[in-house]
Amino acid sequence: MLSLTKKADYALVALTHLAGNHDEHTPPTSARHIADAYQLPLALLMNILKDLAAADIVASTRGARGGYHLQRQPDAITLLDVFTALEGPIHLVQCCDDADERNKSCRHHGSCPIENPMQRLDRRMRAFFHSVTLDDLVTDKPDPIPTTPLASNNGKTPTLNVLNREKQP
């Protein structure tokens, strides 16, 4: 089933720590300090922070008092930004990646009964990850999206037919 990678999980822990200390007067936070505070493997955390720095999510300062700080405000860093920085473009299934030539080689491409619904679900998932910011994680705002299963008119849990109601862009 879908779950965050360790890299994504550790990145969010580190970023929420940095966001909690996000102030222009606060000195940079060392990777070791974050790793020790949350019992994260230092080598992996350093690689994660390097990826986040390459994506301009964090900035690093070298030296004895060096460390990391957020490059942008917490409300300008989305989950999609973080996941993409660590893993590259994210998609539910291969056919949702327009840039991936392999999706055209799928033996079911063009005739798959769930290709269009999965592409719509993929767009919704990406839009959701784009809508959630680091600030949302830090402030632990209530979720505006219902977290209980929606019931259809007949009382059953909806299936992929729910996705078919979404209009194509």
Image (cartoon, helix red, strand yellow):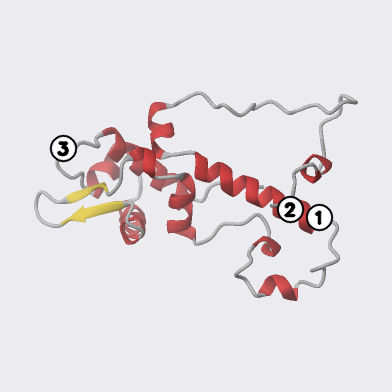
Amino acid on which disc 3 is placed: Thr
Q: Is residue 144 above or below residue 8?
A: above
Residue drawn at x 47%, y 56% is 84
Residue 17 image position (x, y, % from top left): 31, 37
Q: Which of marks 1 and 3 is nearer the N terminus?
A: 3
Badge 2 is on which residue? 118
Instruction: Tell me where residue 98 sits by quadrant.
Output: bottom right
Residue 138 image position (x, y, % from top left): 38, 31
- Check disc 3 and report its element: helix, strand or loop: loop
Seen in the image, is 60 located left or right of residue 158?
left
Badge 3 is on which residue? 26
Closest to the observer, 121 or 3: 121
Closest to the observer, 72 or 40: 72
Badge 1 is on which residue? 114
Residue 99 image position (x, y, % from top left): 60, 70
Q: Mark 2: few, some, or many residues within 10 Å (few <14, many ≥20)? A: some
Q: Mark 3: few, some, or many residues within 10 Å (few <14, many ≥20)? A: few
Amino acid on which disc 2 is placed: Met
Q: In this view, does 165 lie above or below 6?
A: above
**Is there a contact, CB below 8 Å, between mark 1 and mark 2?**
yes
Amino acid on which disc 1 is placed: Ile
Closest to the observer, 78 or 4: 78
- Check disc 1 and report its element: helix, strand or loop: loop
- Check disc 2 and report its element: helix, strand or loop: helix
